[in-house]
Image (tube, rainbow, N blue to C red):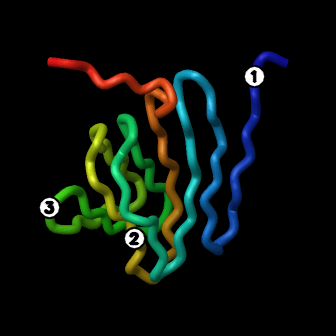
Amino acid sequence: MIEKLYDFSKKDTKQIEKLVDDESILINHMILPKGEGVPEHYSNSNVYMVIIKGIMTLKLDDQEPQKYAHGKIVSIPYNTKMNVYNFDECVLDFFVLKSPNPTNYKEVSV
């Protein structure tokens, strides 16, 4: 078998799971019920959040919080302060893709 398969949770309870951690990419899956969030942190690579269910409230650096609904992909550059929350009734379910994998990220000098 050439391909690899990765399972991810389909529950409605808070979940943060690392799915893929290889040289080129890190993929996490997160489920946040209403009122849950991710601790404030800085992006440690190029981050792509793929929202598959619910509405994400996202605050980046000093910007006002924005809401993004399922079916959206949000791209966040390296070293951006992030606050991710679910303030809405529906469970928030999304994938976080980091490319390159943060362990291999090298900042480019300009």
Location of mark 1 (residue): 3
Give the vertical position of 11 relative to 94 (above or below): below
Q: CA distance from mark 3 to mark 2?
A: 15 Å
Q: CA distance from mark 3 to mark 1?
A: 41 Å
Percent from the top left, x then y, of residue 16? 60, 59
Percent from the top left, x then y, of residue 97? 48, 40
Q: Quadrant of residue 20?
A: top right
* Camera-nearest residue between 10 and 30: 30
Q: Name the quadrant of the N terminus.
A: top right
Mark 1 or mark 2: whose residue is earlier in sequence: 1
Percent from the top left, x then y, of residue 32? 53, 70
**SS type, badge 1:** loop
Label ID, residue 85: 2
Residue at 31% of width from left, 42% of height from top? 75
Percent from the top left, x then y, of residue 42? 34, 50
Q: Sort mark 1 into few (<14), some (14-19) or many (20+) by Cα contacts within 10 Å.
A: few
Residue at 38% of width from left, 36% of height from top? 45
Q: Quadrant of residue 99?
A: top left
Q: Amino acid at mark 2?
A: Tyr
Location of mark 3 (residue): 63
Q: Sort mark 3 into few (<14), some (14-19) or many (20+) by Cα contacts within 10 Å.
A: few
Mark 3 or mark 1: whose residue is earlier in sequence: 1
Q: Amino acid at mark 1?
A: Glu
Q: Name the quadrant of the C terminus.
A: top left
**SS type, badge 3:** loop
* Camera-nearest residue between 42 and 3: 42
Q: Amino acid at mark 3?
A: Gln
Residue at 66% of width from left, 43% of height from top? 19
